Amino acid sequence: MKSPSPLKIGIDGRWIFPAISGVGRVTEKLITHLSTIDRENHYYVFFSDPVLREKYSRRWGDNPRIRPIPVPWGIFSPGGQWGMPSRIEKLELDIFHSTNYFLPLFLRPGVKAVATVHDLIPLKFPHFTPRAWKTRFHPVFRRVLNRSARRADRVITVSRHTRRDLVADLGLPPEKIAVIHNGIDPAYRPLEKEEMVRIVKRKLGSADPYLLYVGRFDPYKNVAGLVRAFAGFSRNRSDRPRLVLAGHPDPRYPEAAEAVAELQLGSRVVFLDGVGEEELVALYNGARALVLPSLYEGFGLPPLEAMACGTPVIVSDRASLPEVVGEAGLLVDPESTEALAAAIERLWDSAELRREYRRRGLARAAEFSWEKTASETLKVYRELAEEDG
């Protein structure tokens, strides 16, 4: 029996930005691990930023099946609506995958399309991202998302929760949607104490105990709520706990910094910008707990990364977080400052409880890998190719 011809698969690398975001990290990890597990098909990765194209050309340079493609259009460029389909047709791609919701509107019918939808936050809860362009241009975003989801031959979601939202809010047929969880990189692991202390001291000035938050500062992340809960927990304690907030500051959302100033927490709350991966792994390892009290998450990578490092986690009981964390973390009502403060206190004061959640977290994190994510995505590509045959 003749083996099928190799597929020519395009992936939109324009979702990888210089200040890498959650979607950018998922895109980068997916391509890297597809290049490891797939020795048959060819991948064309589109970049509009020449610096990033050069960076990833060097990273993937040893693999002849990965070809970075320069394009002059940003993701939302009007010219790209005509230019990208023409470039895709010229390359004779079989499949085009946008790792976020946005597909070129005039993609040719002969090209199989895959769109990943991470969450429907701007659609369902526009007040969670009040200054984002997707909220300010809400009707346009709804139309674009609807059109992309319906043009896609397959939609990938990163959680069962987002899949339910797509069925309920966009009316997509369930059989069109594949749930593929994000993975965890082997770099996220328990470190030797000496290595952890060295890196944490370099970053924070000391390795004294601290709580950790990792992520953006959009209102739905509820970082200001975390600051208030931390203030309640730490008030009148003699051990002077610290809260470390690791994420790129966003001038659109100053609420967390304002809460720190209002509550006069001063140096007990540390804002970190520009944390490298080695530093992040050490920060996870050194934290007494990671706290993510989001009001909504499409997936939630930080708790998974923290658990892989052996760090207990406290997360919101909303959206996809219970699905990701399972019984390996403390679930709490994110809108109750008192409940959040009480959960922090339970973990902070009980070494036995921290050991138990460390054990559970390591076991849970072991169920996720980028190799698994890439393998399940490759299965979607192959299924689409077979449908064409």
Image (tube, helix red, strand yellow):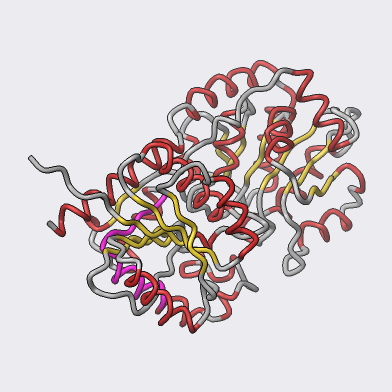
Depth order, front residue of 289/140:
140
Q: Residue 229 lies in magenta, yes or no?
A: no
The stretch drawn in magenta includes residue 152? yes
Residue at 42% in and 62% down? 98
Query: Residue 75 versus residue 237: which sits nearer the camera?
Result: 75
- Rendered-image quadrant of the C terminus: bottom left
Work out whether 185 lies above or below 293.
Answer: above
* Residue 287, percent from left and from top: 73, 31
Give me the residue at 70% from left, 20% from top.
350
Q: Determine whether, in the image, residue 251 is placed left or right of residue 386.
A: right
Horizontal side of residue 160 vs 312, given as left or right: left
Q: Which of 234 and 69 is in front in this view?
A: 69
- Quarter occupied by residue 164: bottom left
| Residue 85: image location, x then y, percent | 37, 75
Picture layout, residue 27 above or below residue 332:
below
What's the residue at 91%, 44% (across, down)? 267
Q: Looking at the image, is 336 positioned above or below residue 308?
A: below
Q: Tell me where the magenta segment starts and ends, as one range.
A: 144-158
